[in-house]
Image: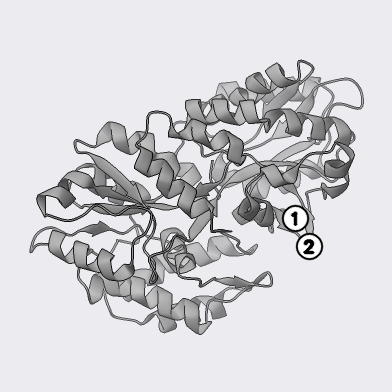
Amino acid sequence: MTPRSKRAAGKIGTAIVLAGALTALAGCSGGGGGGASGGPISMYTWVSSQSDRDQWEGFISLGKKVDPKLDVTIDGPSFNDYWTKVKTRLSGSNAPCLLTTQAARAQELGGLLMPLDDLIKKYKLDTSEFDKSMLKGMTVDGTIRAIPYDAEPIVLYYNADAFKAAGLTPPGTTYTREQFLSDAKKLTTADHKALAIEPGFFTVNAWTIADGAEAVKNGKLDLTNSKLVDQVQSYFDLVNKEQIAKAPEAADGSDVAQAAFTGGNVDMLIEGPWMYGTFADAAKFDMGVTIVPTTSGKAHGMTAGSGFGIAKNCKDPDGAFKAIQAMTAQSVLEGQAAARGIVPSRAAAQPAWADGKSAAAMDAVNALLSNATAQITTPTWNQVETLFTQYGVEGYRGDKTAKDVLNTIQHSVSG
């Protein structure tokens, strides 16, 4: 799972209501949060589909091999409902102990999540083994609130066959904006664009962070800073000035751009590494992976990812933390990388993601993780995404500047 609501929602299928209800009953019968009374530890998370359920059950089943005493039950609504319902769930009876969160939503759930620093010290969890950017993303008011299980640097996928046919050198672990534009213009024709752009701020954020601009400063929304404005304008310009991409429609889902890429209708797409298997299965061409282009050409990744935290009102924080330790053990993350395609948060487990993928893809991921910044947001980020999806279209078409669009959003949303 990733810290982007659209991205996580896009990975899930039809909701399995009956399965969710049965697991919820199991959680209630186990004594709520569990642990203190000898019952199972209850985990509240997003369960939109069988795919979600399989992921969580994978963490538990693999975790039991690390700690045979691990006993965790799963309960939760759809991904989109989770972020509001979790607050109500914790105020009711039989409140769960374990919660899942994303780095991008940790600030939003900060008031619900217990600081873990004392438990980390007590149980000697070596946090240096986890991706630094993700730990920073899971930190609220100076304390770690969740242990990440994945660290997904956003990458640029490209059609290697199209590059070869155009006589272009495939990019490696360095890629300048200048070279990217040169390649894209050579790939673009009157009826064919080189790049697909998704609506929303997620991939725009990856583009801006790659060149050192950020939308949040000291926990506050900071959309009008000049560096960010310039970076967003450069992304808008890919459509209205450079003409290497079409403007996305506000009503489009991310699947529209993804289908354009895998169908060969465009040659490049900025997306997460968790999509590698899906893209490789769908594409009828040799697929390449490189870094999101930067002015210098050096890799600077925006990481997305999720993790396990403990509710502040948990009756057995020690038991819950032991469960987290088991479910984030190296062998568990290696197993999930193989089964689910996640890039593990533990560096030692990351080679497991490379299995079945090109060496160049792993090289790009490693380069990005060596210099990474987590996507950090504010509690009002959903509004930012919604408004950018709406007004961003005008920016891509050249009807409004990035300054206009970002000023409108900044003044419409409390940071």
Q: Position of residue 214 (x, y in %)?
A: 54, 71
Residue 374 in sight: no
Q: Which mark is residue 314?
A: none
Q: Quadrant where the N terminus lies? A: top right
Q: Nearer the viewer, mark 2 or mark 1?
A: 2
Q: In the image, is 320 to the left or to the right of 368?
A: right
Q: Position of residue 234 (x, y in %)?
A: 35, 75
Element marked by disc 2: loop
Q: CA distance from mark 2 to mark 1?
A: 8 Å
Looking at the rendering, in which quadrant would you find the C terminus?
A: bottom right
Numbered disc 1: secondary structure: loop
Asked where in the image residue 147 lies, by quadrant, the reply is top right
Q: Nearer the viewer, residue 294 or 134?
A: 294
For marks 2 and 1, the one nearer the N-term is 1
Outermost residue, left direction? Answer: 190
Q: Residues within 10 Å of mark 2 (few under 14, many from 20)?
A: few
Q: Tell me which residue sits at (79%, 39%) in the image.
A: 125
Image x and y of residue 25, in percent: 72, 22
The residue wearing badge 2 is 141
- Residue 110 tag number: 1
Pointer 2 with pointer 1, Cβ within 8 A: yes
Relative placement, left or right, of 75 versus 293 is right
Residue 353 screen position, x and y as percent: 47, 34
In this picture, is 129 found above or below 409?
A: above
Q: Is residue 324 left or right of residue 412?
A: right
- The amino acid type, in three-letter code, at marker 2 is Asp
Q: Specify the amino acid type for callout 1.
A: Gly
Q: Residue at x 80, y 56 (%)?
A: 143
Foreground residue among 65 and 355: 355
